[in-house]
């Protein structure tokens, strides 16, 4: 974020809060005053922290995870580095196999490319969003190629990758499985 | 709505208790539903302490960081959260350690690949506010303090929404509402592995007329986010805000596989009249019990006589 945008956000935030205080300052003071000094201090500190992070987000988000709110609403999620949600993965073992990630030298890269390919294939053509099925088939082939390059001896991984990459499309994945297997054979030169 | 016209004007200790149970109960579900021991076992090498966890000495991670250590900590946290819910009026001496451990656990979960679950942070702020707002050694919370605690939590929740909305306007500009950002993100989130598995966006984006509607909704939602602090003071605005934000959270579930259920819990407790109703019902229940022969002060007096 440029400094101008950062300052614009901070000023807009302060203007809104100042407006609220101007209109309802008595109630705010009364309520926070009754909550005790610890709560009041904590509330003000978090507000200032959030405001500061909003203003200088690039450095501060890394320094203060407590203020990671600002990551939400980012217009281009893929410009941020891929993030691995350990809690989510632990809850969906069937979909995101830890064994697969542990074997891969850099799971961040694999995860990133899985998402990135889907992104590129869909956005490569403006009309393709409305032709998602055809794009997904291409995506499935791409995953097969990726998997074949990484581990040609483990066909189970192919299915895992497909399932984890196309949630909710399990029926279609099953129908594609033969096609995918064929593509995989082609990729590894069998 | 109360006579004063402002949110939570007539609540007291029971509303404080409701907030405490809601906050700790939400953490209990989060911590109990996901073990981090497999992540540590398979991806421990990926872990990097973030933020305030960097303050811990390196030796701590070596000593504590085993799947057994992770799991023991998780069960300790589950037990503490359950105690924090079940004990009738726990004090700050009990709640602050819980808040500390919850903060540690959240930071630890985020240390794998720097995934920071921003859906949890309003919950974390509320946890600390409840912990700091409770009497040191437990006991009753005065109505004024209860109102203050609920207000402080609601304020930070509202401010968080406001900052998100402002950021989207300032950084994203109008392009984020008129361009391809929304459909692209919907498709990415549909393709990504996730817990919910909705692929509604496949169907939705095939119809050309749907996208402009979604983009208008996105814009209206962002406006609602920006004005969030005002909903603490204006009832009609709050109702309109709820009518936009709650469907927005549900829509992100089916179109993007994103659910901020923690925020929905907080919204129900902090930005609706739910605590007022709970308080009223509790008072009526208490008065009813006190009026029964053999219970309450009057009953006890009669029994003694």
Image (spheres, rainbow, N blue to C red):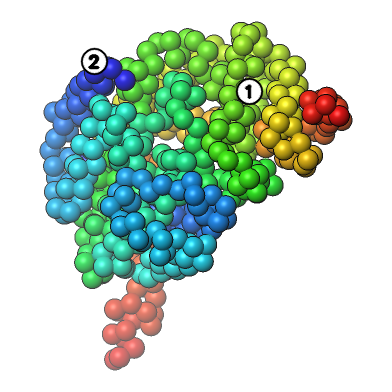
Q: SS of the residue at dot 1?
A: helix
In the rendered image, which residue does mark 1 sit on?
A: A118
On screen, B81 above or below B230?
A: below
In the rendered image, which residue does mark 2 sit on?
A: A4
Query: Which quarter of the rendering shows the C terminus of chain B?
Result: bottom left
Determine the residue located farthest toward the front in the rendered image.
A189
Please indicate whether residue B281 sits to the left or right of residue B200 in the image. Answer: left
Q: Give the quarter of the image for residue B234.
A: top left
Residue at 72% x, 38% y is: A151
Residue at 41% x, 47% y is: B48
Please indicate whether residue A171 sits to the left or right of residue B194 in the image. Answer: right
Please indicate, yes or no, whether residue B257 appears anywhere in the rendered image: no
Judge by depth and name the residue closer to the eye, A171 or A44.
Answer: A171
Judge by depth and name the residue closer to the eye, B1 or B106.
Answer: B106
Residue at 25% x, 61% y is: B134
Residue at 21% x, 60% y is: B142
Judge by depth and name the residue closer to the eye, A159 or B218.
Answer: A159
Same chain letter for marks 2 and 1:
yes
The mark that comes first in sequence, 2 or 1, is 2
Rendering coords of residue B255 (x, y %): 59, 28
Give the crowd class for mark 1: few <14, some 14-19, many >=20 residues within 10 Å.
Answer: many
The answer for how far apart the CA atoms under marks 2 and 1 are is: 34 Å
Rendering coords of residue B300 (x, y %): 32, 84
């Amino acid at each position: 974020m440029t400094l101008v945008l950062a300052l614009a956000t901070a000023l807009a935030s302060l203007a809104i809060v100042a407006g609220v205080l101007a209109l309802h300052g008595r109630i705010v003071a009364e309520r926070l005053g009754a909550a005790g000094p610890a709560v009041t201090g904590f509330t003000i500190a978090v507000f200032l922290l959030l405001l500061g992070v909003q203003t200088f987000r690039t450095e501060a988000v890394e320094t203060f995870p407590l203020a990671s709110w600002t990551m939400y609403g980012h217009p281009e999620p893929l410009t941020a580095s891929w993030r691995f949600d350990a809690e989510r993965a632990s809850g969906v073992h069937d979909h995101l196999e830890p064994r697969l990630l542990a074997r891969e030298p850099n799971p961040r890269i694999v995860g990133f490319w899985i998402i990135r390919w889907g992104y590129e294939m869909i956005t490569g053509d403006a009309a393709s969003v409305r032709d998602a099925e055809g794009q997904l088939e291409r995506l499935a082939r791409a995953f097969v190629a990726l998997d074949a390059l990484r581990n040609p001896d483990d066909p189970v991984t192919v299915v895992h990758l497909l399932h984890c990459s196309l949630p909710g499309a399990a029926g279609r994945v099953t129908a594609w499985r033969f096609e995918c297997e064929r593509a995989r054979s082609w990729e590894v030169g069998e | 709505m109360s006579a004063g016209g402002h949110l939570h004007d007539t609540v007291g200790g029971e509303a404080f208790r409701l907030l405490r149970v809601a906050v700790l109960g939400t953490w209990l579900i989060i911590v109990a539903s996901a073990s981090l021991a497999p992540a540590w076992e398979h991806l421990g090498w990926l872990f990097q302490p973030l933020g305030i966890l960097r303050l811990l000495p390196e030796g701590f991670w070596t000593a504590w960081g085993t799947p057994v250590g992770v799991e023991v900590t998780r069960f300790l946290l589950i037990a503490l959260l359950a105690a924090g819910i079940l004990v009738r009026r726990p004090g700050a001496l009990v709640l602050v350690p819980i808040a500390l451990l919850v903060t540690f656990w959240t930071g630890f979960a985020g240390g794998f690949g720097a995934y920071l679950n921003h859906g949890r942070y309003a919950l974390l702020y509320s946890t600390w506010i409840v912990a700091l707002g409770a009497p040191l050694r437990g006991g009753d919370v005065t109505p004024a303090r209860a109102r203050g605690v609920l207000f402080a939590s609601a304020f930070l929740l509202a401010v968080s929404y406001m900052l998100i909305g402002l950021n989207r306007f300032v950084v994203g500009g109008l392009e984020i509402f008129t361009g391809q950002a929304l459909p692209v993100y919907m498709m990415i989130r549909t393709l990504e592995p996730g817990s919910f598995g909705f692929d509604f966006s496949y169907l939705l984006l095939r119809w050309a007329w749907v996208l402009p509607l979604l983009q208008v909704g996105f814009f209206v939602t962002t406006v609602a986010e920006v004005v969030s602090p005002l909903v603490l003071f204006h009832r009609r605005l709050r109702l309109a805000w709820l009518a936009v934000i709650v469907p927005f959270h549900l829509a992100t579930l089916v179109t993007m596989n994103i659910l901020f259920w923690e925020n929905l819990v907080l919204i129900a407790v902090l930005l609706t009249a739910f605590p007022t109703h709970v308080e009223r019902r509790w008072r009526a229940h208490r008065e009813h019990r006190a009026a029964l022969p053999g219970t309450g002060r009057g009953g006890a007096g009669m029994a003694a006589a």
